[in-house]
Amino acid sequence: MKTRTRHDPAGQDQDATPGTRERIVRAASVLMQRQGYDGTGIKQISQEAGATLGSVYHFFPGGKQELAVAAVRRGDEEFAGILREILDGEPGPAEAVVAVTRSLAEGLRASDWLDGCPVTATALGTAGRLPDIQRAASSAFAGWEGIVAEMLRAAGIAEEEAADLAGMVVCTLEGAELSAQVSRDERPLLVAGEQLARLIALSLRGGLPAGS
Amino acid sequence: MKTRTRHDPAGQDQDATPGTRERIVRAASVLMQRQGYDGTGIKQISQEAGATLGSVYHFFPGGKQELAVAAVRRGDEEFAGILREILDGEPGPAEAVVAVTRSLAEGLRASDWLDGCPVTATALGTAGRLPDIQRAASSAFAGWEGIVAEMLRAAGIAEEEAADLAGMVVCTLEGAELSAQVSRDERPLLVAGEQLARLIALSLRGGLPAGS
DNA sequence: CCCGTTCTAAAACGGACGTTCCATACATCG
DNA sequence: CGATGTATGGAACGTCCGTTTTAGAACGGG
């Protein structure tokens, strides 16, 4: 029942009891996603991960803060993967964005509105205090924006407009998921998806640029 | 130095040392906006408000939770007031939304990116745990949405489309402010403003409805 | 003038927090 | 077979948490 073979450098066994460090990061990511930074205790994390305090501080000598950074990065990569996967499976950018909102809505409802954005809660609770966490969250947003921007450029939207539009898409997804979670209703996400699709369609056919 | 005259039912003196209860709510609102629910202590609130623990528990027998609900409601009303004020001062809905994003950006930058949305941090940290706070936050979002929807209808947009668009506007503002705060950069807000303006302009002239 | 209500003041409590510390187990290497 | 370095188990520490409690001050109505 112990752990598994030692010297498993990255501990990437996919799922079969994934090594202590990996379990700790996963537990931290889930718990902080749900309860925020201050609302999540190290002891709770270690318990949920099936590890002990000694292990936590062994792998994360920087304590809670270092662990939170790892958790945010984990959430970042996880969502980036999902995002890429969905975008690749859709024919056009408008359909892709709608598909993302649908996926987010399903995830939210399936978790009884507990699992929102994996970085927002952690980032927001530590906004002006813990710069390391803030930076990790900021680069997560930037990364997602890049993924969306790439898709938009591939669809033929000009460089600069694609960047703006990608920023808009990520912000709106963020806000809509937040809204849906707080109001326990998937409608904000679905509406956001449709409206974003309108906006993308407008850009695809070179429609009116901001100034009415 | 004490307080002021007793029996000041609502304690609405505008600003001249506004009574203990009022000071407590204000301090709670600001602190929870910045640090979230779990990150803010009752003792910190009482100290910041220039009150004592006795006063806090006198006015809020329900403890921290009741105080948080009052703080969220206060943030709700505050932003609703600002929103109405800005919307009334602009000629059309597109300009109005842009003005709101500019105002939010200024507020964020002026506070060194500390003061984001007055309800998001509190709501997100207590999402599945404290239903009272969640409800207060949810009704705040709904109220803001109503204000925006009314403006859109007044500008001639049909009932149902105005509702969807208003939801989109509020979600995007929420997400953009979050993004701006985390990345310490006002660009997300400004981009969101312009893109929302495009979307509104599209609705004003009966443009393409979702289906590409 | 005194009583009751309203409000303020601060001490005290049990518990949880993040962190430190050390003793132990185990695989690997000389 | 020691010896070594990595990993685990868990007790212990000091601090701060939300809350309770008890006492006192400031007013209003009888």
Image (tube, coloured by chain):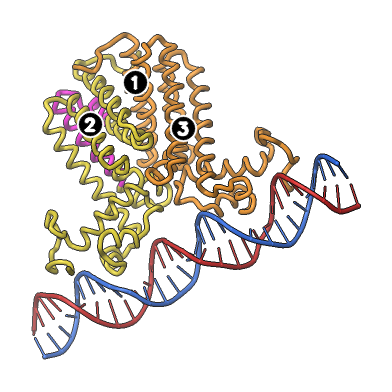
Chain colours: A orange, B yellow, C blue, D red
Whether residue A109 is visible: no
Residue under numbered circle 3:
A106
- The residues bearing labels 3 and 2 have C-alpha atoms spaced at a distance of 34 Å
**First to last magenta residue range:** B137-166
Residue plotted at (44% across, 25% down): A100
- Chain of the residue where label 3 is placed in the rendered structure: A
Please tell me which residue lies in front, C21 or B124.
C21
- Report the Cα–Cα distance between label 2 and label 1: 16 Å
Which residue in the protein does label 1 denote? Answer: A164
Chief secondary structure of the magenta span? helix
* Label 2 crowd bin: few (<14), some (14–19), many (20+), radius 10 Å: some
* Nearer the observer, A24 or A109: A24
| Residue B5 x/y as whole percent | 12, 68
Indicate which disc residue B102 carries.
2
Quarter of the image that includes the C terminus of chain A:
top left
Residue A71 x/y as whole percent: 52, 40
Same chain under badges 3 and 1? The reply is yes
